[in-house]
Image (cartoon, coloured by chain):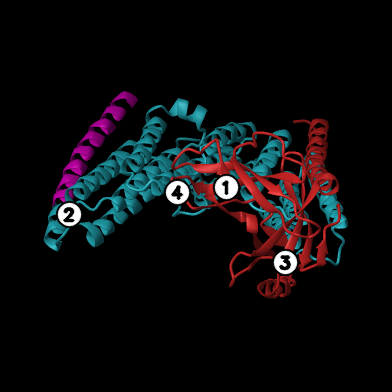
Amino acid sequence: MNGRKLLVAAVVVAVGQVAFLAAMIQGRAALLRDGREVVLRTQPVDPRDLLRGDYVALSYDISRVASTLVQSPRPRDDQPLGAVAVRLQQGEALQPAQIVAVFAGQAPGPAAEGQIDLAGESDTRWSANVEEIMISYGLERFYLPEGEGRAVERGMRERTFKMVVAVGEGGQAQIKRFYDGETPIYQEPLY
Amino acid sequence: MASYTERVKAEISRWQAGGLIGPETAAVLTRDIDMRRGAGFSLGTVLAMLAAILIGAAVLLFVAANWEGIPRLLRVALLFGLLFAGTIGGAVAKIRGSSGIGEALFVISAATFGASLALIGQMYHLSGDEVQAIGTWGVATAIASALLRSPALCVGAVMLAVAWMLGTTSGFWNEHTPSAWFLAASLLLWLLSFWVNSPLSRVGVLLALLLYGTLFALVRGGSEMLSLLIALLSAAVFAFSVWMPREAARFFALGATLPALGLLGFYWGMGLVQIQVDDVAAAFLLAIVVFGGTALALWAAGRDNRRLRRLAYAGFTAELVYLYVQVLGTMLDTATLFLASGFAFAAIAVAIRRIERRFARHVEGTAS
């Protein structure tokens, strides 16, 4: 490979990689800016070891769902559910949203007024006697500066914490504001 | 590997002393071998690569610390700047002839790309797609390797592909088999390794495939057949490398390493079968297969391949230890097996000595 070609290739690689990363940032920022807001009640995952590395591991009220809420099409037995759409009824002000229904795959129709569809993923293997399914939304982590996690972790054991989440058109969710009771403790900037 | 050049030099002086070559030819050959050694290893290159790995790790940790002393948008800009500097600086270094420094800079920029992905994950609290992020990182590194024709990045892409594959199993004991997409990725990386001329990547891919098969066999409990398949495929690779050397040079281009890898895979697969079998008769049979395979491998390729010989000794010893510790019910049974195997090996040794002597006579006959 001669010199000029290599230099051109290097520019292409650098510009391409930076463009890819910038597009990722832009997509997330757009979600924060334009997404509809929904309030979720959150709690720590494991009472002893919440903080792994520099994030708090979270779970939500809507992370465990009664299997009776799962609507047709009925999933196949013994197969992980995979992608699900979770329909939520939005609460007033900072009231947490409530689950209306869970659809395996895509939601069959648009959500009603005051409702919102959230995209999730479930590893739970379906069978007739499954009572509860576990769903993850890509919201299960809250990153904090090194060393700040412990205070949040202690607080979450004692009080109710809530998360305001921005939801895009496809149901993709993005953490937006973190509430200790009614007080916002972290607010995410766009960039 | 310094011993290789030493040995060739010893041969050269022996040829010269024996009158096979003149002093001029000897001098030319010695100079040539010295130059090749210079091309293979350079302390500067190695140190540059180690420095790159350290700097890359520092960048990744810097992001992980999530330090708020620098606003995060500035952190993004710093990483993007480093990415540019590494890639373009690396190209400039290579154009100026410092190939090692150039590769090292490419490695730093690849690490920076991974750090940027981690930073974005942190900025927007993305959870649950680390595996996907590692996959993205690997794809980007592979593309960069192809465009920049960088062997170091190819090795990096192989390592990221392995990390991704391990991520898709999420641990040994649950029921996820590693993603089958890894096989497609292996094929692409294999082709890439030829394009950028990186035999190390090919060794990495082969070892990774061995790991893939192992995980697959372990996750699917009670899968002796799968393990046996690993052993058989490895034996096939070995046979291919020994009996079709020209094709092997074209499709693998790994020289003497390939038969050694084939033998390693054979031992590995047989070992996997053995840890899953607790029937004494089957263990006995498997041990005979391993001993037979060892003898066959030594016969087929042991003469010119020191690495293979050492591996064969190691495999042979491991099998002995395994039998001694694990399988046969009583010491008397084990002793009987060892005695029988010993006789079998002795018989093979005598037969091979005869063949070799006849072969040597034949060669002398045609030479004179």
First-in-chain label (4 vs 2): 4
Principal secondary structure, stretch drawn in magenta: helix
Residues at marks 4 and 2, CA–CA distance in whole angstroms: 39 Å
Badge 3 and badge 4 both on one subunit:
no
Would you name the residue on which mark 1 appears? Answer: A69
Q: Which residues are magenta?
A: B340-368
Q: SS of the residue at dot 1?
A: helix
Q: SS of the residue at dot 3?
A: strand
In this rendering, the label closer to the viewer, 4 or 1: 1
Residue B345 percent location from the top left of the image: 20, 46
Q: Amino acid at mark 3?
A: Phe
Residue B111 in magenta stretch: no
Image quarter of residue A54? bottom right
Q: Please give left or right for residue A76 compared with residue A37 in the image.
A: left
Write down the chain letter for disc 2.
B
**Callout 2 environment at 10 Å: few (<14), some (14 to 19), or many (20+)?**
some
First-in-chain label (3 vs 1): 1
Q: Amino acid at mark 1?
A: Leu
Residue A126 percent location from the top left of the image: 47, 45
* Residues under numbered marks 2 and 3 in contact, where contact means CB atoms less than 8 Å apart: no
In this rendering, the label closer to the viewer, 4 or 2: 4
Residues at marks 2 and 3, CA–CA distance in whole angstroms: 69 Å
Would you name the residue on which mark 3 appears? Answer: A161
In this rendering, the label closer to the viewer, 1 or 2: 1
Would you name the residue on which mark 2 appears? Answer: B338
Q: Report which colour depicts chain A.
A: red
Residue B15 percent location from the top left of the image: 45, 40
